[in-house]
Amino acid sequence: MPWLWPSQAFLHGPLTFGDDVSVNARASIDGGAVGITIGDGTRIASGAVLYAFDHAMSRERTIREQPVKSIGITIGRDVWIGANAGVTDGVRIGDGAVVAMGAVVTHDVEPYAIVGGVPARVIGVRPR
């Protein structure tokens, strides 16, 4: 089980947490139907959102009637997801990566990459 600050974080499974994971205030983590796996030592800052589901957008149905799909999210070991960052369904974040504050991650992130922006793109690499 992750370390949760006593702070109304929203957790909805299926979720798999490694050892020593922390989830801070107002984080929202929803595994959808497939789930989210978070590796050992990962830190999730205040207000971060990880949603392992998405809605279709066909014109043949109203927004309210759209089907939901779920691919799942995988977060590696020793990852830092910054405050108010978002991670969308289907994303894999490699070990040691850093997601900057407010970034929206819509594609996979390589190990030790630093990503930022909307949508997130590589802005650096963690030094050795």
Image (cartoon, rainbow, N blue to C red):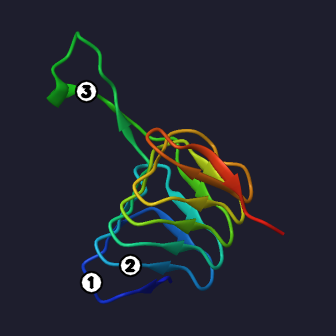
Label drawn at residue 51: none
Residue 1 position within the rendered picture, expressed as x and y whole percent measured from the top left = 50, 83
- Horizontally, residue 63 falls left or right of residue 92, namely left
Query: Could you tell me the amino acid type at mark 2?
Result: Asn
**Lower position in the chain sequence, tag 1 or tag 2:** 1
Residue 94 position within the rendered picture, expressed as x and y whole percent measured from the top left = 70, 56
Crowdedness near tag 3: few (<14), some (14–19) or many (≥20) residues, C-alpha within 10 Å: some
Q: Would you identify the image quadrant in which residue 60 lies?
A: top left
Label drawn at residue 24: 2
> Answer yes or no: do the residues labelled 1 and 2 have beta carbons within 8 Å?
yes
Tell me the residue at 69%/70% (across/down). Answer: 77
Tell me the residue at 40%/66% (across/down). Answer: 83
- Horizontally, residue 128 falls left or right of residue 78, namely right
Q: Would you identify the image quadrant in which residue 56 lies?
A: top left
Q: Is residue 54 above or below residue 48?
A: above
Q: Secondary structure at mark 2?
A: loop
Which residue is identified by label 3?
A: 66
**Lower position in the chain sequence, tag 3 or tag 1:** 1
Q: Secondary structure at mark 3?
A: loop
Q: Nearer the viewer, mark 3 or mark 1?
A: 1
> Of 107 and 37, which appears nearest the observer?
107
Query: Could you tell me the amino acid type at mark 3?
Result: Gln
Residue 103 position within the rendered picture, expressed as x and y whole percent measured from the top left = 45, 51
**Lower position in the chain sequence, tag 2 or tag 3:** 2
Which residue is identified by label 1?
A: 7
Task: Determine the CA span between mark 1 and mark 2.
Answer: 7 Å
Task: Determine the CA span between mark 2 and mark 3.
Answer: 32 Å
Task: Determine the CA span between mark 3 and mark 1.
Answer: 32 Å
Tell me the residue at 18%/26% (across/down). Answer: 63
Q: Is residue 94 above or below residue 40?
A: above
Tell me the residue at 63%/43% (across/down). Answer: 108
